[in-house]
Image (cartoon, grey):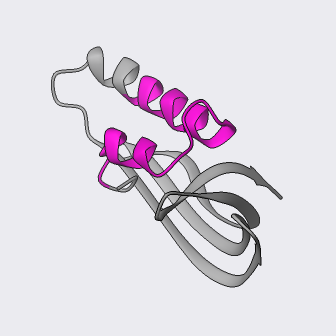
Amino acid sequence: ALNDQNWNKVKGYCIYDSEIYNDVVQLENTVNTYCFSYDDCRVVIAIYPTILDVWFNGPFCCVYCHMNDFSAVDGYDLNNAQSYIMYYHLEKIGNSWKLFEKHT
């Protein structure tokens, strides 16, 4: 969903007003603000996680990932390809797991 910039779908995977939800809102606003100034704006966001481990504790879990990402606007890199380790925290709400926090 993030790679397709389907912002509502991405936010739907997050707990409302959590750290990760607010990061998505900020990214959406950045893309929209930049593209508002240009008629033919093309933004590429590519994020490829590799899940290395998952820990469960009742309605909470922690996902340990190796992340690779890249972003560009109109062919210009916003940042070089990055590779890093990230921990994501999720909470089970109903039948769905929702993201709420991340850290390195």
In magenta stretch: residue 22: yes
Question: Residue furthest toward the bottom?
Answer: 52
- Mark yes or no: residue 74 visible: no
* Drawn side of residue 63 relative to residue 30, left or right: right
Residue found at x 24% / y 32%: 41
Residue found at x 46% / y 64%: 95
In which image quadrant can residue 7 be found?
Answer: top left
Q: Is residue 30 above or below residue 74?
A: above
* Majority SS type along the magenta span: helix
Residue found at x 29% / y 53%: 4
Question: Residue furthest toward the right?
Answer: 104
In magenta stretch: residue 28: yes
Q: Position of residue 84 (x, y in %)?
A: 73, 67
* Drawn side of residue 81 relative to residue 33, left or right: right
- Mark yes or no: residue 79 visible: yes
Q: Is residue 63 above or below residue 99?
A: below
* Drawn side of residue 101 relative to residue 37, left or right: right
Q: Position of residue 85 (x, y in %)?
A: 76, 69
Q: Position of residue 13 (x, y in %)?
A: 46, 52
The count of marks equals 0
Question: Residue furthest toward the left?
Answer: 39
In which image quadrant can residue 39 be found?
Answer: top left
Task: State the quadrant of the C terminus.
Answer: bottom right
Task: State the quadrant of the N terminus.
Answer: bottom left
Between 61 and 36, the residue placed more toward the observer is 61
The span picked out in magenta is 4-31
Q: Position of residue 86 (x, y in %)?
A: 75, 64
